[in-house]
Amino acid sequence: MKLDTLIVSDNQKVQNLLIDKIRELINYKNLEPGDKLPSERMLSEKFEVSRGMVREAIQKLEFYGLLESKPQSGTFVANIGIIALNGMIDDILRLEEQDFKSLVETRILLELKTVKLASLRRSEEDLAHIKEMLDAYEKKALSGEDAVQEDLLFHLAIAKASGNGTMNKFMLTITPQIIIDFGKYHVCDKNQAVLGIAEHKAIYEAIKEQNPDIARQKMKDHFSVLYQYCYNSK
Amino acid sequence: MKLDTLIVSDNQKVQNLLIDKIRELINYKNLEPGDKLPSERMLSEKFEVSRGMVREAIQKLEFYGLLESKPQSGTFVANIGIIALNGMIDDILRLEEQDFKSLVETRILLELKTVKLASLRRSEEDLAHIKEMLDAYEKKALSGEDAVQEDLLFHLAIAKASGNGTMNKFMLTITPQIIIDFGKYHVCDKNQAVLGIAEHKAIYEAIKEQNPDIARQKMKDHFSVLYQYCYNSK
DNA sequence: AACGATTAAGTGGTTAACCAGTTTTAGAAA
DNA sequence: TTTCTAAAACTGGTTAACCACTTAATCGTT
């Protein structure tokens, strides 16, 4: 599905290299909070890359609050100490190391919480939506087709019902990578897909009955296979 | 610090509108997985926006695995059912609703986990880094200056020591918004900043002694004020 | 009429030119 | 020398042109 991963990561490597160069520049020139960076044109010339690349790198640093671009004026170092800035850039550059284990660990943490919140806060509309995804998954799994996406949509419906926008966003964020990794590591075979139906139903029932503790336990049971798979193989 | 929030959100509103239009188009034309979307140029003309805007919208949908752009060929609907596609786009469009409460709720969930993981997995290097941030925070808080950033850097150091790249990334992701919201709602006054020193030290000691349960409890104590503040005021 | 080769049109990706607004500089008046 | 003004240079943001490549169409040959 995603054969262009190499190209993407190439671009990202260039961007990370650029971010590192910008950091070095800030250190070399002893730029303090509020000081102005060289213009995008100068940076693109100095680093021998296109201006677009420089812009993307700056935008990323801007997103994390380390730089601030003012239109028709310049890009400035944010109000953050030089040590902190270096540390945060280190973190940002290491962000790519999102191994499968971290991903699954985080997903389990999020889902054990969202399923509790969903049990407590769900509306009738939320419940109907979850049921809809449950049925779609059951149909696909029983027919023997690949049902990874329907599986995840069920979980996303729960995240939506949790009423927590941030967790919902995080679930959406990790979902594409999970789909890729599941395909790569062949996590889900058809037996597990069929077994998953009953587990999904149990989770749904608990949410329906608004019982957060049972819901959490059923979700934990549902993840036990994945948890073991992940920690044994990788 | 971020006075251009309105402009940014304006751009994002346009982008969301575009995403919605693209969704409508897919539904209207009954495009199925694998079908080709109209070219970026045609879309930009049809929706009366610049091609750059169209590209950004497509890239966002591509990030979530809903579309797939092939160079010199076209943009295609991913291998996902039309119902699922509509549902996920709904979710994506609602992503902006990240209220302060959701943010804090998620942060607490993440931090109670990362502090446990950090206690178990920390290296000596990690510990030294955490200590460094602890000292920087103490110095700033005692001097009466605003120490929100040093506070968060301490927590980010813990996230880093957790050895979970995904959680670390999520912490980094929410940090800028937390800084903004703290400024907006005036969460941290100087008394709390000084009180926080002892709490930070307690957390650090637990991590140093590699005691995950105490570490988690101390973190929970540390968040009790924030938790109440958040749930009472908003 | 059917097939193959060649050309034309169309695609996403990239680069260079342009824009409106800011900042510095040069210049003239006091 | 100082100060006010005006113009030139510079900034991030945006748009239009260009590129390499793919795909569809067209024409010629069999």
Image: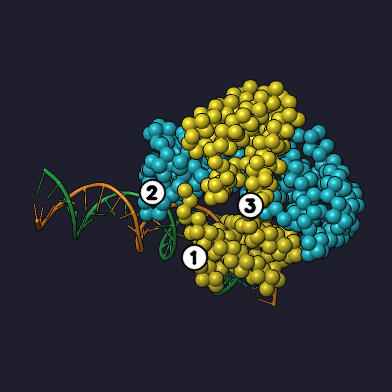
Chain colours: A yellow, B cyan, C green, D orange
Query: At x 79% / y 45%, what residue is drawn?
Result: B112
Which quadrant would the C terminus of chain B be assigned to in this image?
Answer: top right
Residue A127 visible, this orientation: yes
Identified by mark 1, the residue type is: Ser
Is A103 placed above or below C15 here? Answer: above
Q: Chain of mark 3?
A: A
- Disc 1 from disc 2: Cα separation: 24 Å
Dot 2 corresponds to which residue?
B74
Which residue type does callout 3 highlight? Ser
Q: Residue furthest front?
A: A191
Q: Which chain is home to disc 1?
A: A
Q: Nearer the viewer, residue A114 or C12?
A: A114
Instruction: Provide the residue designation for mark 3.
Output: A233
Of badges 2 and 3, nearer the viewer stands 3
Instruction: Using residue B118 as the reference point, say whether residue C21 is left or right of it.
Output: left
User: CA separation, marks 3 and 1?
Assistant: 42 Å
C-beta proximity under 8 Å, tags 3 and 1: no
Q: How far across and down, in percent of the image, does residue C21 sit?
A: 56, 55
